[in-house]
Image (cartoon, helix red, strand yellow):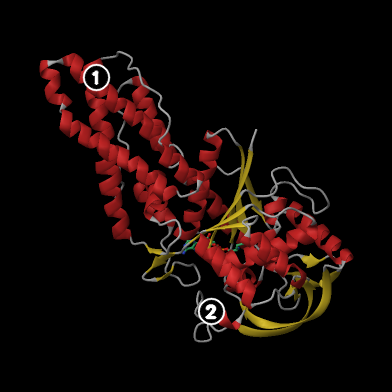
């Protein structure tokens, strides 16, 4: 059986989740469900990034012990994923003992091999990103995502050898052996690699500056750099213990992420894997940012819409739908509460909801308990192609085109009039409509699992479904 390993980033446990996190996770869930429906053996991973300066600071501000703090935030994320019907197979927390042990053992191996060495490091550090930045990334001297000046850090640290990988990495990205989607992001990374030779990076912080993290196994006065700790989640989530051997499902087939974290995923992550003697991911799939008021929606900036608010009012499938269809796969896009409500009314309540009710009401009346034969047609080719290319919004467009087509078929053929003269003819029209609706349900299943289930059930029992969309104001 073909295997498919799909990942989301592990999210910082510094604050509650927002729509941006829900976006990546819902998209990954849709693709995982799609892969399962194509008969693949899927491992879908997500989780929490729980160490580092940013979290240590936030826990301190709230007067909480960091472990207790991250326990609480992780529970909120996990509850959200449950409410959003996220079908993950593995949920990793970097404060899990098994993860910490594996990281320590991997670092020991790297140190023994000479991939890690002690040295001096100087760089511009943005604690919002938990990343060293290069000057060309700044705008007006500030980190463009966090709107603050990075601090100049000069420290005696441990470094990971990176420089030797630059050329090979460039080749692998160019040839799509390590595919970066979309092409614009691939080119961005390639031009970054051309301009800046890969430099060895600092992979530890002195314990007195950052104590909330995994101590280096060979020097307990240093804490592992949070990104190194975080990258290894993609292995530890599969039960990897930090030693030799490639865990089942590895390497990832598809790694979803926002554009904010592509550069580290396209440089540090592959270098780390090369040192560990492990294969590189097949594809990094990069989406744009959801904006709010023209700026990246972010916990740090405080302009986020909490998913729980929309979930409570509109339900999981409505939020899944909005994220899957109305957010472009690659571009940035603004999201507002008003826009969400309009889409909900037009596409779901009055669109899919009404269509289903109309068709099933007629079907229930005309067939009166008879079983309707449904033709199981192949899914439309363009739908399959878009799903296989992970362009979920375009695949959803195909579904809504079919919904529109069924709507206009009702208007054109007027079965509710025909039935008065010719019941058999009306039944033929309904067969076509119910078959179409059944196909809609199959195509919707990865997107709106609950709604698709209700439609299928209604068709099987040939009766009106309970209301598909009911908003709780
Ligand atoms: O970067 N629009 O965690 P993070 C779209 N822990 N997606 C968004 C978004 C937005 N406004 N905001 C966040 C980290 N995301 C690290 C990752 S992985 C080894 C470590 C999504 O909590 C998007 O996927 O800041 C983005 O890349 C990720 O959340 C960043 O989450």
Q: Position of residue 28 (x, y in %)?
A: 53, 49
Residue 101: image quadrant is bottom right
Most foreground residue, 341 or 252: 252
Residue behind mark 1: 428
Instruction: Please give the name of the residue rendered at 54% of the width and 81% of the height, measured from the top-left corner.
Output: 138
Query: Is residue 144 left or right of 363 when viewed as pictured?
Result: right
| Ligand 1: image quarter | bottom right
Q: Which mark is residue 102?
A: none
How far apart marks 1 and 2 lie (CA) works out to: 63 Å
Q: Is residue 93 left or right of residue 382?
A: right
* In the foreground, 120 or 84: 120
Residue 15 seen in the current view: no
The percent position of residue 391, horizontal first and vertical second, equals 46, 50
In the displayed structure, 146 sits above or below 357; it is below
Pick whichever, 400 or 349, lies toward us: 400
- Image quarter in which the N terminus is found: top right
Q: Position of residue 305 (x, y in %)?
A: 41, 62
Kindly tell me whether mark 2's CB lies below 8 Å from ligand 1: no
Mark nearer the viewer, 1 or 2:
1
- How many numbered marks does the figure carry? 2
Badge 2 is on which residue? 143
């Amino acid at each position: 059986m073909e295997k498919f390993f799909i990942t989301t980033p592990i999210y910082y446990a510094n604050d509650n989740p927002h729509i941006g996190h829900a976006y990546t996770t819902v998209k990954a869930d849709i693709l995982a469900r799609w892969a399962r429906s194509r008969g693949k053996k899927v491992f879908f991973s997500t989780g929490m990034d729980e160490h580092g300066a940013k979290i240590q600071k936030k826990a301190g501000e709230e007067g909480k012990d960091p472990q207790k703090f991250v326990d609480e935030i992780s529970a909120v994320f996990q509850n959200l994923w449950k409410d959003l019907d996220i079908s993950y197979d593995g949920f990793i927390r970097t404060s899990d003992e098994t993860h910490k042990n594996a990281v320590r053992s991997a670092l020991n191996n790297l140190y023994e091999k000479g991939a890690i060495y002690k040295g001096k490091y100087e760089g511009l550090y943005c604690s919002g990103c938990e990343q060293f930045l290069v000057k060309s990334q700044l705008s007006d001297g500030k980190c463009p995502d966090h709107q603050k000046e990075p601090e100049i850090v000069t420290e005696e640290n441990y470094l990971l050898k990176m420089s030797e990988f630059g050329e090979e990495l460039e080749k692998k990205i160019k040839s799509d052996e390590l595919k970066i989607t979309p092409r614009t992001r691939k080119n961005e990374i390639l031009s970054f690699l051309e301009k800046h030779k890969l430099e060895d990076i600092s992979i530890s912080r002195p314990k007195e500056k950052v104590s909330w993290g995994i101590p280096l196994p060979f020097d307990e006065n240093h804490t592992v750099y949070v990104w190194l700790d975080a990258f290894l989640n993609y292995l530890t989530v599969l039960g990897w213990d930090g030693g030799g051997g490639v865990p089942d499902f590895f390497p990832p087939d598809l790694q979803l992420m926002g554009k904010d974290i592509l550069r580290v995923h396209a440089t540090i992550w592959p270098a780390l894997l090369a040192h560990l003697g492990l294969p590189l991911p097949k594809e990094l799939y990069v989406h744009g940012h959801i904006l709010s008021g023209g700026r990246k929606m972010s916990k740090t900036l405080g302009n986020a819409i909490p998913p729980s608010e929309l979930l409570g009012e509109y339900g999981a499938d409505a939020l899944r739908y909005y994220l899957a269809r109305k957010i472009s796969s690659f571009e940035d896009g603004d999201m507002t509460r008003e826009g969400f409500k309009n889409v909900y009314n037009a596409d779901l309540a009055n669109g899919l909801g009404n269509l289903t009710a109309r068709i099933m009401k007629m079907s229930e009346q005309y067939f009166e308990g008879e079983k309707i034969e449904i033709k199981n047609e192949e899914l439309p080719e363009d739908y399959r192609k878009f799903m296989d290319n992970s362009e979920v919004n375009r695949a959803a467009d195909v579904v809504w085109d079919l919904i529109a087509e069924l709507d206009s078929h009702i208007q054109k053929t007027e079965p509710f009039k025909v039935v008065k003269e010719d019941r058999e003819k009306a039944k033929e029209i309904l067969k076509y409509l119910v078959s179409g609706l059944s196909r809609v349900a199959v195509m919707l299943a990865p997107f709106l699992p609950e709604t698709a289930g209700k439609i299928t059930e209604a068709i099987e029992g040939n009766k009106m479904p309970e209301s598909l969309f009911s908003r709780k104001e």
